[in-house]
Amino acid sequence: MATDYDTPRKQDEELHEESLEELKARRADAQSGQVDIDEEEAAENLELPGADLSGEELTVRVVPKQEDEFTCSRCFLVHHASQLAKGEGAKAVCKDCI
């Protein structure tokens, strides 16, 4: 936005009168928009669709470690033997951890 520097400036009295009224108006406007919200209470009342898993039973099939698999000593994940980078047994390390 361009500023015209040739326009006459307001008098000191006009600035004082307007600024006091404007400050009071701004202060009232700023406070009227504030609402105190308890974040914990708002989070408790928020329900996500499909998020109620209280009646669900989760079943997981556990398969023992196969002979061609190893457990990485750094990330503790079970990997296929093709992912073995170095070591054997308890000191085996996968390619992802190197």
Image (tube, grey):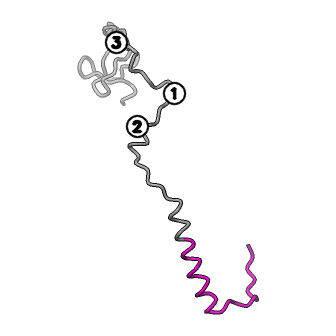
The residue at which mark 2 appears reads as: 44
Which residue is identified by label 3? 69
Tell me the crowding category of disc 2: few under 14, some 14 to 19, or many 20 or more residues within 10 angstroms, Cα based.
Answer: few
Work out whether 12 lies above or below 40: below
Image point 41% across, 46% down: which residue?
39
Depth order, front residue of 4/63: 4
Q: Is residue 72 magenta?
A: no
Separation of disc 3 and disc 1 at Cα? 40 Å
The magenta region covers: 1-26
* Disc 2 residue type (three-letter): Glu
| Amino acid found under the numbered disc labelled 3 | Glu
Q: Amino acid at mark 1?
A: Pro
Q: Position of residue 2 (x, y in %)?
A: 75, 76
SS type, badge 2: helix
Residue sitting at 39 percent across and 25 percent down? 95
Left or right side of 19 for 45: left
x then y, percent, for residue 53: 42, 21
Which residue is more in the foreground, 2 or 70? Answer: 2
Is 88 located above or below residue 96 in the figure? above
